[in-house]
Image (cartoon, helix red, strand yellow):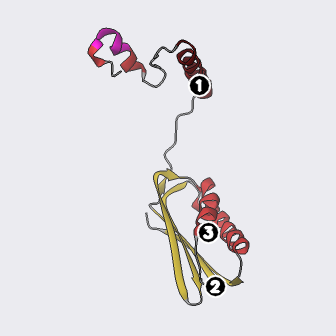
Amino acid sequence: MPELILTKTWPGLANRQDLTRAAGAMAAALARELGRRVYRELCLEAVAENEVTATSRSFPAPQGPERLPGHVAALAARLVVPGPVTGLTIRLNGLSLAVPRQLTFFETARARRDQRVRRLLQEVNREKEVLVRPLADTDRRERMLSFYDPLRRKN
């Protein structure tokens, strides 16, 4: 998919708060326009005193439109400009449609249980000074194979 660009001119954003607020408003408008699409790279360009200053960030995983205002605010806080900003451009690259995820009812319960197991193993290791290898970090297949194949154990 082609890149998505939003450009807006401003009368002159003199301080960091105005720049962040303006970038946030632009990001919110662009997030509504994104719809179900996700992005992998974000670029923020500012025009100040006829000089273009840009900063960008790439993401390893696709980012949804709900994260765009926060990412743009972080880039705006990082942007170094020589004077009052008269124009802002937000550029999104690596656009694609969001892949739906299968939801499960037990995902949070499993995460809580794994956290309790890790905490318990840490306490046992601290009190008894025994090295206990947590099985919560390994997947089910590896745990089952470790019963039958002793050479599969990593630790």
Q: Which mark is residue 76?
A: 3
Q: Who is closer to the viewer here, 8 or 143? A: 143
State which tag comes first along the sequence, 2 or 3.
Answer: 3
State which tag comes first along the sequence, 1 or 2.
Answer: 2
Q: Decide: marks 2, 3 in contact (CB < 8 A)?
A: no
Q: Position of residue 51 (x, y in %)?
A: 53, 87
Label 2 Cα crowd, 10 Å radius (few <14 / some 14-19 / many 20+): some
Q: Who is closer to the viewer here, 152 or 45? A: 152
Amino acid carrying label 3: it is: Ala
Q: Position of residue 18 (x, y in %)?
A: 73, 74
Amino acid carrying label 2: it is: Gly
Residue at 68% x, 74% y is 19
Amino acid carrying label 1: it is: Gln
Q: Secondary structure at mark 1?
A: helix
Magenta highlight on residue 148: yes
Residue at 29% x, 12% y is 150
Question: Which stretch did the figure color magenta?
Answer: 144-150
Q: Who is closer to the viewer here, 97 or 5? A: 5
Label 3 Cα crowd, 10 Å radius (few <14 / some 14-19 / many 20+): many
Q: Which mark is residue 115?
A: 1
Q: Position of residue 29 (x, y in %)?
A: 66, 66
Q: Distance between the Cα atoms at labels 2 and 3?
A: 14 Å
Q: Distance between the Cα atoms at labels 1 and 2?
A: 49 Å
